[in-house]
Image (cartoon, grey):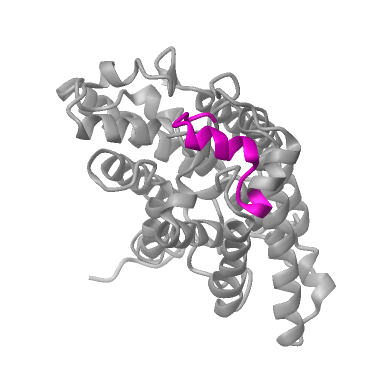
Amino acid sequence: MAFKLASSPHLSSKSRTSSVMLKVMLCAVPGVLAQIYFFGTGALIQILLAITTAVVIEAAILKLRKRPIAATLSDNSAALTGLLLGVSVPALAPWWIVVIGALFAVLVVKQLYGGLGNNIFNPAMAAYVMLLISFPLQMTTWVAPAGYALHSVDLLSTLAIIFKGASPEAILAYRAGIDGVTMATPLDTIRTGLSTGLTINEILTKTSFSSGFGAGWVWINLAYLLGGIMLLKMRLIRWHISVALLSTLFICASLGYLLSPDTHTGPLLHLFSGATMLAAFFIATDPVTAATSNKGRLIFGALIGLLVYLIRSFGGYPDAFAFAVLLANLCAPFIDYYVKPRAYGHRTSH
C-alpha cells in the first residue's frame, strides 16, 4: 500500500509519498552541485554512501519486522534521509562516519519508533548530532573551498582519504604544517576569533571569508535557497516555517549587531552561512516532525530561528541548526496542542 503524505491532520493530499520525496531530492540538486563544486567529489561520495547505507539498513530492518520491503523502500524516505545526512558530513570524513550516521538515523530514530510517520525527531539531524558529539574532530574538519585550498585533492586522493585515512600528499602537507586541504568553517572561524579577543571586522579579513561572506558557503546557501523556492513553487512545502525561521534569525541577528557590532555577526552572514538555507527549506519543513497548523508552523519556525541565533552567539556549537531542529521537534506536540484549530460549532472550554 502506498503511503499518502498529508501536511496536517486537517488537510489531505493526493501526492504519493514517493513522488513528494523524490521531488524534494531533485530540488536539493542545486545545493548538492554547489557543495560538490566547492568541496570536491568527496561531497558526492559521502552522499552516495549515506543513501546506500540508509536504504540497505531500512531493507534489513523491514525484513526482520516481516514488512513489505519493496513497497516501503519505494517511498524514498530512506534515500532522502541519506541525502540530508550526506550533505551535512564533511567531504573528507572517514567512510565509517556517514555509515554509522545513516545506520543510527534509520534504525534508531526512524524504525524503532515504527517507521515513517511515527518518528518524533528528524532522523538526519538526530544522526548528525550523535556524530558531532561522538566524533567532533572528524565532523568539524572541512575541505577548504575551491580557490582557497593550497593543495587540490583529486578523485584518487579523495578516495584514499575517505577509505584509507589520508593520501601521501595530504600527509606531507600536514607534516609541513600547511593547512593545504582543510579549513575551519566561517562560523567556526568567527567563534574562535571572538574567543581570542578579535572583533568581527578583524575576523572577516581572514581567508575563510570573501566580501564579508563565508568563502563558498554564500553560494551554497544561495543554491539551496533556489531549491527552496522550487519547493514552494511546486507546493511541496508551505512557506510558514521557512519564512518564520529566516525572519526570526534576521531580526535577532540585526538587533545583536546593532547593539554590539564588534562581537555579533551581521544578519546577512547568519542567513548565508552554514546550513541556514538547507535547514530552512529542506530540514525544518519535515511534515512528520514539525508542527501541523499554519499558526503552529509559524511558532515552530520562529523557535528554530531564535534557538539558532542563541546557540550560534552564546552556545558551544557554531552552526546550531541540528540542535535547534531537534529541540523544536520536542516542542512540536505542545505547539500543536495549544494552537490546534477549534472544531466548527464548538466553543472553547473555560
Horizontal placement of 285 versus 2: left or right?
left
239 or 174, nearer to the observer: 174
Q: Is residue 174 inside the magenta stretch?
A: yes
**Residue 349, position as x, y percentages in the image:** 28, 71
Examine the image and state in which quarter residue 123 appears: bottom right
Magenta residues, start to end? 162-180
Query: Which residue is pictured at 66% across the width and 37% down the height?
Result: 32
**Furthest residue to the right?**
70
**Residue 7, position as x, y percentages in the image:** 59, 56
**Residue 172, position as x, y percentages in the image:** 56, 35
Please determine whether, in this image, residue 246 is positioned above or below residue 20. Answer: above
Instruction: Say whether residue 194 is visible.
Output: yes
Q: Is residue 344 inside the magenta stretch?
A: no
**Residue 141, position as x, y percentages in the image:** 48, 43
- Quarter of the image with the C terminus is bottom left
Query: Which residue is pictured at 57% across the width and 58% down the height?
Result: 97
Please determine whether, in this image, residue 127 is positioned above or below residue 61. Answer: above
Please determine whether, in this image, residue 78 is positioned above or below residue 205. Answer: below
